[in-house]
Amino acid sequence: MKRKMNQLVKRVGSVVPAMSGAFFMLAANTSMVMAATDTSSVTKPLDNLKTLVIAIIGAIGVIILAKNVMEFAQAYQQQDSSTMNSALKGIVAGVMMAGISSVLAILGF
């Protein structure tokens, strides 16, 4: 038993100085990071992408709105109730898509 204990002490004794040296080097080699307080350089591309996507959705909404208004007018002229119903749904969807930018602006996005 004494022999095993001596072997353990020798193994631990050889590891402890290396580990303490490694921890000392980690503590001694810390460097100060000078981070910028302005984050706009990081978030500006994301804001531009968000603005672009919202503008595209708004433009598609206007196109859908115009198409469905014409479709509703034709269906009203022909007294086709199923097409009028479909066109009214498309008009509502177009208004929602066209107005998404103002809704998001009100919400703070």
Image (tube, rainbow, N blue to C red):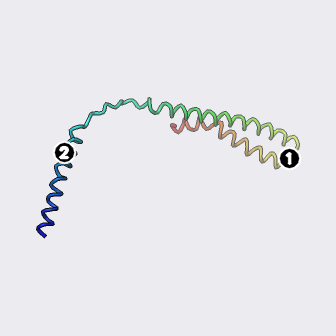
Q: Earlier in the sequence, mark 2 or mark 1?
A: 2
* Camera-nearest label, 2 or 1: 2
Mark 1 is surrounded, within 10 Å at the Cα level, by few (under 14), some (14 to 19) or many (20 or more) other residues, namely few
Q: Is residue 4 left or right of residue 96?
A: left
Residue type indicated by callout 2 = Gly
Contact, mark 2 vs mark 1 (Cβ under 8 Å): no
Look at 84% across and 42% down and name the residue there. Answer: 76
Tell me if 85 is positioned left or right of 29 in this view.
right
| Spatial CA span between label 2 and label 1 | 86 Å
Query: What's under tag 1, amino acid-wise?
Result: Asp
Mark 2 element type:
helix
Residue placed furthest toward the right: 78
The residue carrying mark 1 is: 80
Q: Residue furthest bottom?
A: 1
Q: Position of residue 81 (x, y in %)?
A: 83, 48
> In terms of image quadrants, where is residue 24?
top left
Local crowd at mark 2 within 10 Å, few (<14), some, or many (≥20)?
A: few
Work out whether 17 lies above or below 52: below
Front-most of residues 33 and 41: 33
Circle 1 — which element? loop
Would you place residue 82 above or below residue 8 in this image?
Answer: above
Task: Examine the image and state in which quarter residue 78 appears.
Answer: top right
Tell me residue 90's x, y (percent): 73, 43
Residue occupied by mark 2: 21
Query: Residue placed at 48% from the left, 30% from the top?
Result: 44
Going by the image, does 49 lie left or right of 22?
A: right
